[in-house]
Amino acid sequence: MAKKEKKEEEEPRIGVFICHCGSNIGGFIDCKEVAERAKKLPHVVFTQDNLYTCSETGLAAIKKGIREHNLNRVVVASCTPRTHEPLFRACIEEEGLNPYLFNFVNIRDQDTWVHQKVPDKAFIKANDVVRMGVAKAEKLEPLDKIIVDVTPTALVIGGGVAGMTAALNLSNQGFETHLVEKDNRLGGRLNGLYKLFPKDQESSELLDALKKKVENNPRLKVYTSATVKNIEGFVGNYEIEVEQGKNIIPLKIGCIIVAVGTSLFTPEGYYGYDGEKRITQSQLEVKLKSGTLNENEIVMIQCVGARIEERKYCSNVCCMTALKNALIIKEKNPNTHITILFRDLYTPGSYYEEYYRKAREKGIVFIYYNPEKAPKVEKDTIKVFNEYIGEEISIPYDLLVLSVPLVANAENKALAQMLKVPLEENGFFLEAHVKLRPMDFATDGVYLSGSAKWPVDITESITQGYAAASRASTILSHNTLEVEGATSSLPEYNKALCTGCEVCITVCPYKAISKNEDDEIVITQVLCKGCGVCGATCSNHAIVIRHFTDEQIMAEIDAFGGK
Amino acid sequence: MSFEPKILGFLCNWCSYAGADLAGVSRVQYPPNIRVIRVMCSGRVDPAFIFKGFEVGADGVIVMGCHIGDCHYLEGNYEAEKKFAMVQKFLKLIGMDNRIRLEWVSASEGARYGAVVTEFTEHIKSLGPAPTGSDNPDQTMLTKLKAIKVAASGERMRELVGRQRKITEEENVYGEKTDMETFLKIFNSAIVEEFERAQILISLGEDRKSVKALAVELQIDPSIVLGHMTILKARGQVDFGEIVGITPMFQRI
Amino acid sequence: MVRKLGDNSKSVVVIGAGIAGIQAALDLGDMGIKVYLVEKEPCIGGRMAQLDKTFPTLDCSICILAPKLSECYRHPNITLYTLAEVQKIEGSAGNFTVEVLKHPRYVKEGVCTNCGDCGSICPVRGVPNFFDADLVTQSAAQIAFPAAVPPVYRINPDVCLYLNYGICGLCYQNCGADAIDFTQKEEVIPVENVGAIIVATGVDLAENIHTLNVYGYQKYDNVVTAMEFERLICASGPQQGHLKTLTDGRTPKKIAFLQCIDSRNDRTQDYCSSVCCMYTTKEAMVAYEHDNELESYVFYIDLRAGGKGFQKFLLRGAEEYNIKYIKSKISHIEVDENQSPIITYENLESAEIKQMRFDLVVLATCIIPSLSNEKIAKILGIDLDKNRFIKTDPFFPIESSVPGIYTCGCAREPMDIPRSVAEASGAAARAAELVKGG
Ligand SMILES: Cc1cc2nc3c(=O)[nH]c(=O)nc-3n(C[C@H](O)[C@H](O)[C@H](O)COP(=O)(O)OP(=O)(O)OC[C@H]3O[C@@H](n4cnc5c(N)ncnc54)[C@H](O)[C@@H]3O)c2cc1C
Ligand SMILES: Cc1cc2nc3c(=O)[nH]c(=O)nc-3n(C[C@H](O)[C@H](O)[C@H](O)COP(=O)(O)OP(=O)(O)OC[C@H]3O[C@@H](n4cnc5c(N)ncnc54)[C@H](O)[C@@H]3O)c2cc1C
Ligand code: SF4
Ligand code: SF4
Ligand code: SF4
Ligand code: SF4
Ligand code: SF4
Ligand code: FES
């Protein structure tokens, strides 16, 4: 290696390889001549044209060029870096050059293929872009991969079904796992429920089975009546303080999973809610569980406090909860009258639609209501405008059950600040990418699962628990974490330029930049994705974006101008 | 020979560059005037790159990134938008703001990439060569362009742009949010001020000058020039050189 | 991030390389576990690659998918077999042996430069491209779409003249890279020491099994399916995203979207497809972005939008994109003399029977399980549910009926992309438990 290092510090010796890509490039422009002209560019010591630079023959030619001409920079002009850059980088690396000393010039996809009718102009363009590419190559610097250690230990915050599932999976994968639950028992929402859709299984049965697995797992440590007090560090290397009673427990952690679930909404002021005759579905579950339900004229209203101006969202589980409870009641006492006033019945997928059908078969009455003409609750009757027959109807009731949404925990904000992750407008945690990174935060090392992200049923809480565990395992499975070298940096020689204005901290989407105790800017390389925004923004040009440095890009621009 | 504009393009790797490649794979034909510099994200495009492009002879500069919401780095293109808006305001001062363009082109928009480049090339053609471009550039314009580059690269403008989203979109610790209008007012006056200050600095680079002489040369009210001098002096960029009679002559540090 | 192969001796086989299979493979690969990803089509990406934009953020589907495709292709821990299927398994959880049958592509991967010269010279024309919902045709030397992964052409053996009649061979002569290899044969690849299997065979659509004649599909040209519509509005699709009617090339000004086609219907599929309320809104929005004079009508039974940000998405559709939602039941469809469809429906809010004329009708057809599910279930010995999705238990949602065989995504129930991705990671976590011997 030592020899190579030296090679890179020497004067740039650039080799340029022009690819014909069969006739795809060579059929339109004179590749030989492009190579010939490149020879005259500064620091270029060797040029060659190849029929297929990416073929084994072509790659061998590059290696031979490096050997025989002592090249320390390589430029290939051919198809596109998007498909072929990794191949050429690997090629020069095999010959002992740092892979970042390679530069790609696109003369096919963005030249000969798009200017087929003006080949002479495509030729000029090819020469220009080769000149620009060589100018950048001259300024390229070798870069090393960045490596940090990883503590193979996980922290799960919240011991509901999602949190327990995640923690169990991680400990079964062999990682020491810590589960912190603020309540004095595990289980979250499951604790208050009677039976569960879509299986007609008692909640306690599912919960007890899970709890047993959790308690018997040697690698899983549970802290109940505990909260996370402080979080320092970054992916692979967190220092955590857990507060349990008067004790502060310090933990070294590699990854964190957020599974803090939701809170219940109290429909104060909605439809005469009083917790007695007019109750919520949760309260109904308690009644069912204790066998104290005697009413037999029951009306349920859906979307209470949901899908309205203040709370626009649909809470996902309340339609199914209503159907479940209505069916349970009907089963026990088929003579009970149950009416469900709904807006849209939310029973997606292949399992839930069946519930809806069953409910209709059992004689449960479904009446659509328009939110602009909301039902009116009187002492013993409910008046609702039936759109279908075009008039108001009265329904007598002795129990009114309101289906209210799950809402975000009030404490989410404090936790989010500690974790440096965002919340969305309703107070739920906001993932990195709605579609492709549903369990990740933008910040590496912190993951999300269950209803802390959005109201979901148990099935989805379980899959998401596993999913978050999987994401964490992609980090925890390795002793070290390696990232590509093309990241942002605040080099020693630029430190004096930095005024500590913190603008870079503001713009970094990955929270990779922070200040240390000495008030100095620190860029955590493993978190940086190399987007370059901080470099383009830094008020004092102190930040250097490796592999896309100001110097390199300016050299390209100069070469564009012909200089 | 008809005018063949020189066009410089900055393309983000993930969407626009992929879109440009797709144009190739689909053999979409467009004018051969553009030269592309690939950056990882449109947010990497430092305003200085655009000014530099004109300095070395570009007739038009186009920046392309992923559609808003699609940035591979989540929000880079929002930052690109802010920087671009500043560049545009500066170039307006010298009547060149119609020579730049910001476009969002996705990886599936090969045909659109071709259309955008064609349209932009035609547009620049119709404008004719940039005063700063060609073989024989207009020196006063070049000096002004340099002043703009200096102004835009200064700490004040960069900090304002860097903080814009934070200031206008998030509340500060007192729960207040600066509305866009207030921000723009500050921003717009900063642009004019910094441009004037940069012109002063460049002019002083040649010679020691008095406030009055500068005022005449740059056609700015002397009281405003004096104000700029106080600030530039505080920033440590100018100082009194000598006093001729009762007139202080300033010099650049 | 750079990933090394861990010291796990066991590997995982993932069947189906849609977004679910891809995500499962990537997670496992990133954990340092060796993965064999088996895809029956010539390229990976599944349905998501075909979509134009995706709800609820309207981002360009291929833009966000393409980086994942190439990551998967290049991942040192993932071996990708395209044009391949699993034909046999033996053993049990923790130690399966899997036999993969790989069909010949007749083009050498790693040599083909994706230039398309073979395709342009091939005399066989009119081969429908499944990727463009058969709206576009190709030659026998083909690639599904320009950015396909692997970026390698393929000679379609069903129609190639050389392979069928021994004549032609023009592509072979025209390929400068010498990438075409007519001597390729079917290959049986045994994969041993497989700790777990993940089935991610995804979706097919109702139009693949029904004619949908009652809705005028295949009877009237201006009645298209949602998947066809996705391609029609896609910038890289057959009309470059400039929506035109298929009959006379008019720009449609009024479009009807009919929901629950063959879903929630006792006679066909009785379940809800879960994603159509949302993708319909998306499609109407995208179409509106192309043409601000467009009026869209969505005929629905219930609007199902429970996911994150979904309600807001529907509201935006109604407020900003000129979409009108009508709670209704469709009676029948006919066409006028200009081939414009006329819909007769019952408005369920006002109980009135009404008629409306449209330029185009889009059918939100039911998502059905992959047509290959029966075959794969038999090979693997796993159970299917009554709708032929892979059977799972609601509280063990990732487990199939056989230990060590997991499932995720639309293979087990219709679901959207975010959920497919989450489940895929979930399946990876379960498989990892087995591989790591926990
Ligand atoms: C009335 C009702 C009936 C339902 N019926 C069903 C049903 O039949 N079938 C079904 O599938 N789903 C049902 N659900 C939904 C089900 O309850 C949820 O899907 C499930 O409980 C979500 O699990 P979770 O782990 O995400 O969150 P939770 O169950 O809310 O658990 C979160 C845990 O995190 C803890 N926590 C919160 N903040 C912190 C913190 N800062 N630090 C540490 N710990 C913290 C909480 O104490 C709690 O234990 C029902 C919901 C309701 C309201
Ligand atoms: C018209 C339409 C629009 C949509 N729009 C959206 C949207 O905007 N947003 C959103 O979130 N979701 C949308 N969806 C849903 C989305 O397409 C699915 O969620 C997603 O594709 C599911 O991914 P998957 O990997 O499970 O299945 P698929 O994408 O179907 O992938 C399955 C893969 O497995 C392969 N395969 C099948 N059988 C075998 C076998 N036996 N052996 C080997 N390989 C096999 C297939 O070839 C395919 O590549 C839409 C769906 C449709 C129909
Ligand atoms: S699940 Fe049903 S009751 Fe709950 S908010 Fe959604 S539509 Fe309303
Ligand atoms: S933006 Fe630049 S000057 Fe400001 S704190 Fe960051 S590195 Fe320092
Ligand atoms: S390059 Fe991007 S990710 Fe890296 S520190 Fe700068 S802003 Fe953050
Ligand atoms: S097989 Fe040959 S001709 Fe066809 S795309 Fe590949 S390299 Fe080009
Ligand atoms: S050999 Fe087959 S694929 Fe090739 S050109 Fe002839 S018909 Fe087409
Ligand atoms: S990556 Fe394309 S704009 Fe940021």
Image (cartoon, grey):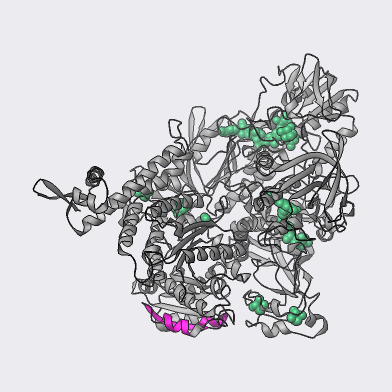
Confirm whether residue C51 shows in the render. Answer: yes
Q: Position of residue B177 (x, y in %)?
A: 46, 34
Question: In terms of depth relative to the viewer, which is nearer, A127 or A142?
Answer: A127
Confirm whether residue C416 shows in the render. Answer: no
Ligand 3 quarter of the rendering: top right
Q: Is residue A39 magenta?
A: yes
Q: Is residue B21 magenta?
A: no
Up the image or down, A64 lies above or below A138; here it is below
Up the image or down, A291 lies above or below A531; here it is above
Instruction: Report the side of A541 relative to A184 (left or right).
Output: left
Question: In terms of depth relative to the viewer, which is nearer, C50 or A281?
Answer: C50
Image point (34%, 70%), residue name:
B136
Q: What is the number of callouts on the image? A: 0
Looking at the image, which residue sits at the far top?
A379
Q: Position of residue B37 (x, y in %)?
A: 47, 65
Image point (71%, 50%), residue name:
C283
When asked about the image quadrant of residue C436, the answer is bottom right
Image point (47%, 81%), residue name:
A34
Q: Position of residue A550 (x, y in %)?
A: 38, 61
Q: Position of residue C71 (x, y in %)?
A: 60, 62
Instruction: Report the side of C328 relative to B233 (left or right).
Output: right
Question: In terms of depth relative to the viewer, which is nearer, A270 or C24?
Answer: A270
Question: In terms of depth relative to the viewer, which is nearer, A560 or C272?
Answer: A560
Q: Which residues are magenta?
A: A33-60
